[in-house]
Amino acid sequence: MTVNPEASQINKEYEYGWSNPEKYAIKAPKGLSREVVEMISKAKDEPQWMLDFRLKALEIFYSKPMPTWGADLSGLNLDEIYYYIKPEGFNARSWDDVPEDVKVTFERLGIPEAERAALAGVGAQYESEMVYHNLKEEWEKLGVVFLSIEDGMRQYPDLFREHFATIVPPEDNKFAAVNSAVWSGGSFVYVPKGVKVDIPLQTYFRINAESSGQFERTLIIIDEGAQAHYIEGCTAPAYNADSFHSGVIEIVVKEGARFRYSTIQNWSHNVYNLVTQRAAVYGNGVMEWVDGNLGSKVTMKYPACYLLEEGARGEVLSIAMAGRGQHQDAGAKIVHFAPHTSGTIVSKSISKDSGRSSYRGLVKIYEGAKGSKTNVECDALLLDEEARTDTYPYIEIEEKDASVGHEATVSKINDEQILYLQSRGLSEDEAAGLIVRGFIEPIAKELPLEYAVELNRLIELEMEGSVG
């Protein structure tokens, strides 16, 4: 297992870096094998078709090479990862039924308090399994479904099988394949026609064990004319050894529906975060990704909107912050399959010390998608001379009657800005923090107030000692 001495020092500053003693019902041996895949399927008492799906995905994973583009993955030793850890006691409907040490963990993270104050429902995943899932009764009565994905498979088999792995199949990429082979946990969400869930659903993911892998899979179906907002958060203890997170998110936004998926990712700096997120958007539907990437050692994540029918719209707002030892390789994809579809990508990144932020995005307009348009804005802010930023925009246009715009800026905090704000009574750190908060304001204002405050607080923590 790769051990990064520098990460040890960095992680000392990470406020969510504590861990609990290990108490597990099942812990698979390290490494990925057919036996591990069969163990997972047996532990979940799955139908034969799902085991067959997992084993086929395992073969696809073995057949695909590690990506050589993007971030450096040479330090990720897949043979040193635990691919399945089932904690004692899981899938409770009441916080009182969650094992005490796990409950205390989520209380320290503020999850029960957030559920009471501002959420329609909450899911909490600990290691490989959902330990808690609950939807408020008022939304259950309207037919909203919010379950662990395992319960979604058991209770809604036809709806589950109609959509599962249709938007992100195992063949899509190597990490979609490994997720398909060993997936465990995640949410299953269905919002019926015309129902508008006006407060967010949230799922929180927590890794606890050293060298752990987490491979949740979330399937969300927003039926015609419905609306909802889903928030995802995540943390992990700080270890010297690396951990691995590879989730798959599949979303269906049907005709006239509107859905927002917000992420505030704050993994510890020993986590490789390699995620596939994609939405299929139908006629006049709207899909919005609000994506905040602060933690992790390496992140490769490109939320995507596939605009499949006329009038569909996709929006991606993302913020990435990279400090010492981090590479945030984040971006977005907008793919136009149908006429008069539209998209917007706004990507902002902040880099400090030797941190590296990369924007990597794709805009593709297929022939026949007449009148389609997308605009891309990439803004990078460098806080010092060691920081690095890159932009890799890919634009493929096969239709003459289409429009794509791309703007990119790179700026640095300069002495003149700092001195001006100091003349107004701010300290040097306060001045730098104010500039950064103004930089990320277009993203923060799209989050519910509580989460915008949390995003600003996390940015401020990352900013400590950045100037001077």
Image: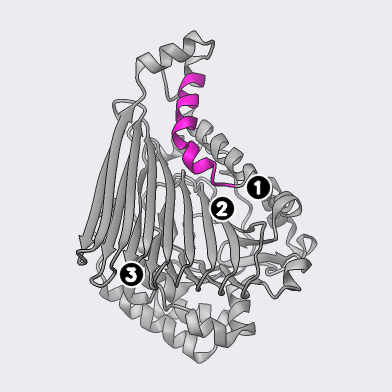
Q: Quadrant of the C terminus?
A: top left
Q: Quadrant of the N terminus?
A: bottom left
Q: CA distance from mark 3 to mark 1?
A: 45 Å
Residue ranking furthest to the bottom: 48
Q: Which callout, 3 or 1, points at the residue further toward the start of the chain?
A: 1
Q: Which mark is residue 231?
A: none
- Would you say residue 411 sits in the magenta stretch? no
Of 278 and 54, nearer the camera is: 278
The local secondary structure at tag 3 comes to loop
Q: Earlier in the sequence, mark 1 or mark 2?
A: 1
The residue tagged 3 is 339
Disc 2 residue type (three-letter): Gly
Main secondary structure of the magenta stretch:
helix
Q: Which residue is mark 2?
A: 233
Q: Amino acid at mark 1?
A: Leu
Amino acid identity at mark 3? Pro
Label for residue 109?
Answer: 1
C-alpha gap between disc 1 and disc 2: 10 Å
What's the colour scheme?
one colour
Residue nearest the observer in this picture, 252 or 99:
252
Q: Is residue 75 left or right of residue 105?
A: left
